[in-house]
Image (cartoon, coloured by chain):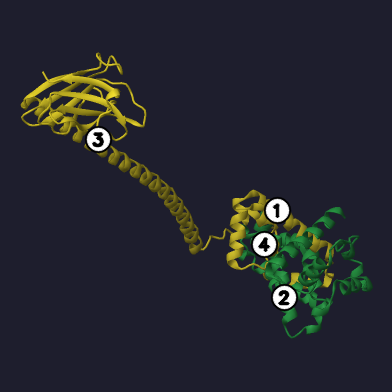
Chain colours: A yellow, B green
C-alpha cells in the first residue's frame, strides 16, 4: 500500500467535503485507523478546512441565533441546572444498535478467518514443497537401491559361475614385455562352458583414444574377445566366449579395438597351463 | 472544551453546550452555507435549518466515521446544495464567481462588519487557473467533484488531484496569514 499516493489522491479531501459514497467513506475510515500517517493528514486537513471555512465565513446575524434557539427550545432538557461540567456525566448512553455489533463481530470474524486462511495456505504450500522434495528423494533412493540390487545379482551370478564352473586361472603378466613391467591381469576360463572373465590387478590408465583389448591366441591366430576396462580393478569382467586357446594377451588398441592385435603394443601375456 | 465532552453535552441536550457549539462553529458553518447561497436571507434560512438539524440529529453522528466539524459542515453544505437545486433559486446563481462573492462582501456593509482581517482574496492567492476553477465550483457554486468532471469533461482523477492541490494552497495561505 502506497500511503503517500493514497494521501495525495484527493480522496481525503473529498471525504471531508462529504462527497464519497458510503463504501468509500468506510474505506477512508479504516485506512486512517490502520495508518497513522493517513489519520494525521486527515486531522490536519480537517483543521485546515475548518480554518478556511472560518476565514471565508461570516458570523450570522443575531436574529438567526435567536430563531435557532427558539426552534431548539423544545429540544433542551428542562433541567436548567445541568451545567457543562456535569453534562457529559449525564450524557445519555446510546447503545449501538444490535446490527452494528453484529456487523463489527462479523467483520472481525471475517478478518480473522481471512488471516487464518492466508496463514494455512502458506503452511500448506510449504508442506507441499517438502512433500514434493521427499518424493524426489525417495525416487532417487529407489533408483539407487535398484542399481545396487542389479549389481548384487550380477555379482551373485558371477560368483555362482565361479563356484559351480570349472575355471582355470591364467595369470597375464607384463614382466617379460617392455610396455608395463608391473602389469598384471588374472583371467578365468571355463573351457567346457566357453566362459572367460578377467580381473584387472594392475594396468596403467590409458588416454581417451585407446582401449585395452583381450586376445585369445589359438590355432587360428589371435581373436579379439573384448575390451578390458582398466579402471574396474579387482572385479570380474565377462569377455566373449572362447572354446580353444593356448594363450591370452592384452594389447593397447585405438578406441573400440582392432581386428588384429598391434603386437608392438603388447602389454601382458599368459599361457594356458 | 474537548470534542468528546462537547458531543456528550450535545447528546444530553444541554443548552449551554449547544450555545458553546454555536459560538465556536456558527461562523465557519454559516460560511459554508453563505458562500454557496449568495442571498443572505436564504442563506440564513438554510443555516437555521441546518443547525437545528445538527442538534436534533446529534445521536446519528458517529465519532468513528469522522470529526464533529466535518459532519456538521457536510450537513450545511448538503443543505445549501439542495437549496440551490430547488426552485427557490434560479439557475443564474450558479454563475456566481469568487469575485462576485468578494465584491458582495465588500460592498455589503452589513456583513463586512463581521469579516475579520483575513480576506477571501488573500486566501485565494497563489491558486493557479485550474485550482481557482476547482475552488470556485466546489466552494462557491456547490458543485460536487463528479458534476465538475461531467459538466466540464475533466477526468475524475484530474478533478480529485486538483481538489487536493487547491486545498493545499488554501491550507498554506491559512497557515501563513
Please name which of the two marks, 1 or 2, marks the residue nearer to the observer. 2
Q: In which quarter of the image is the C terminus of chain B?
A: bottom right
Residue A154 to residue B98: above or below: above
Residue matched to label 2:
B153
Q: Quick one: SS at disc 2?
A: loop
Dot 4: chain letter: A
Above or below residue A201? Residue A258 is below
State which tag comes first along the sequence, 4 or 3: 4
Question: Is there CB contact under 8 Å for labels 2 and 4?
Answer: no
Circles 4 and 3 on the same subunit: yes
The x and y percentages for residue A116 are 43, 50
Mark 1 / mark 3, whichever is N-terminal: 1
Q: Is residue B39 above or below residue B11?
A: below
Lateral position of residue A104 relative to residue A206, left or right: right
The answer to whether mark 1 and mark 2 are in CB contact below 8 A is no
Expressed as whole percent of the image width and height from the top left, the position of residue B81 reads 73, 75
Count of labels in the image: 4
Spatial CA span between label 1 and label 3: 94 Å
Q: Which mark is residue A11?
A: 4
Can you tell which quarter of the image residue A216 is in?
Answer: top left
Q: Do residues under tags 4 and 3 come within 8 Å of each other at their CB atoms?
A: no
Q: Which residue was labeled with disc 1?
A: A41
Which of label 1 and label 3 is nearer to you? Answer: 3
Q: Nearer the viewer, residue A129 or A47?
A: A129
Both labels 4 and 1 in a single chain: yes
Identify the residue at image location x=61%, y=68%: A21
Amino acid at each position: 500500500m502506497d500511503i503517500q499516493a493514497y494521501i495525495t489522491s484527493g480522496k481525503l479531501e473529498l471525504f471531508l467535503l462529504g462527497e464519497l459514497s458510503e463504501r468509500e467513506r468506510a474505506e477512508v475510515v479504516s485506512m486512517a485507523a490502520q495508518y497513522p500517517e493517513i489519520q494525521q493528514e486527515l486531522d490536519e486537513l480537517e483543521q485546515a478546512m475548518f480554518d478556511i471555512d472560518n476565514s471565508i465565513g461570516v458570523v450570522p446575524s443575531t436574529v438567526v441565533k435567536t430563531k435557532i434557539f427558539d426552534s431548539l427550545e423544545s429540544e433542551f432538557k428542562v433541567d436548567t441546572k445541568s451545567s457543562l461540567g456535569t453534562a457529559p456525566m449525564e450524557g445519555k448512553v446510546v447503545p449501538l444498535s444490535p446490527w452494528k455489533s453484529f456487523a463489527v463481530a462479523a467483520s472481525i470474524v471475517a478478518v480473522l478467518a481471512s488471516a487464518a486462511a492466508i496463514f494455512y495456505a502458506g503452511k500448506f504450500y510449504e508442506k507441499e514443497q517438502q512433500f514434493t522434495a521427499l518424493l524426489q528423494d525417495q525416487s532417487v533412493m529407489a533408483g539407487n537401491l535398484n542399481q545396487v540390487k542389479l549389481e548384487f545379482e550380477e555379482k551373485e551370478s558371477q560368483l555362482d559361475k565361479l563356484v559351480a564352473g570349472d575355471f582355470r586361472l591364467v595369470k597375464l603378466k607384463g614382466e617379460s614385455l617392455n610396455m608395463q613391467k608391473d602389469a598384471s591381469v588374472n583371467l578365468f576360463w571355463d573351457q567346457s562352458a566357453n566362459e572367460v572373465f578377467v580381473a584387472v590387478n594392475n594396468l596403467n590408465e590409458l588416454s581417451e583414444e585407446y582401449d585395452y583389448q583381450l586376445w585369445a591366441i589359438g590355432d587360428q591366430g589371435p581373436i579379439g574377445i573384448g575390451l578390458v576396462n582398466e579402471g574396474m580393478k579387482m572385479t570380474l569382467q565377462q569377455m566373449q566366449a572362447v572354446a580353444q586357446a593356448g594363450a591370452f594377451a592384452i594389447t593397447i588398441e585405438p578406441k573400440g579395438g582392432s581386428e588384429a592385435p598391434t603386437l608392438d603394443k603388447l602389454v601382458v601375456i599368459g599361457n594356458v597351463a | 472544551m474537548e470534542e468528546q465532552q462537547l458531543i456528550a453535552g450535545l447528546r444530553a441536550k444541554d443548552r449551554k453546550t449547544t450555545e458553546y457549539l454555536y459560538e465556536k462553529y456558527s461562523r465557519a458553518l454559516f460560511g459554508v452555507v453563505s458562500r454557496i447561497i449568495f442571498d443572505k436571507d436564504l442563506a440564513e434560512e438554510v443555516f437555521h435549518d441546518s443547525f437545528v438539524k445538527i442538534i436534533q440529529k446529534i445521536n446519528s453522528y458517529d465519532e468513528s466515521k469522522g470529526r464533529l466539524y466535518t459532519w456538521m459542515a457536510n450537513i450545511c453544505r448538503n443543505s445549501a446544495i439542495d437549496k440551490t437545486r430547488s426552485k427557490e433559486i434560479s439557475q443564474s446563481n450558479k454563475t456566481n464567481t469568487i469575485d462576485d462573492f468578494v465584491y458582495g462582501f465588500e460592498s455589503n456593509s452589513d456583513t463586512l462588519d463581521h469579516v475579520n482581517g483575513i480576506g477571501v482574496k488573500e486566501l485565494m492567492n497563489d491558486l493557479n487557473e485550474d485550482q481557482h476553477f476547482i475552488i470556485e465550483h466546489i466552494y462557491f457554486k456547490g458543485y460536487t467533484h463528479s458534476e465538475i468532471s461531467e459538466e466540464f469533461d475533466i477526468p475524475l482523477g484530474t478533478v480529485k488531484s486538483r481538489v487536493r492541490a487547491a486545498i493545499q494552497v488554501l491550507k498554506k495561505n491559512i497557515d501563513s496569514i
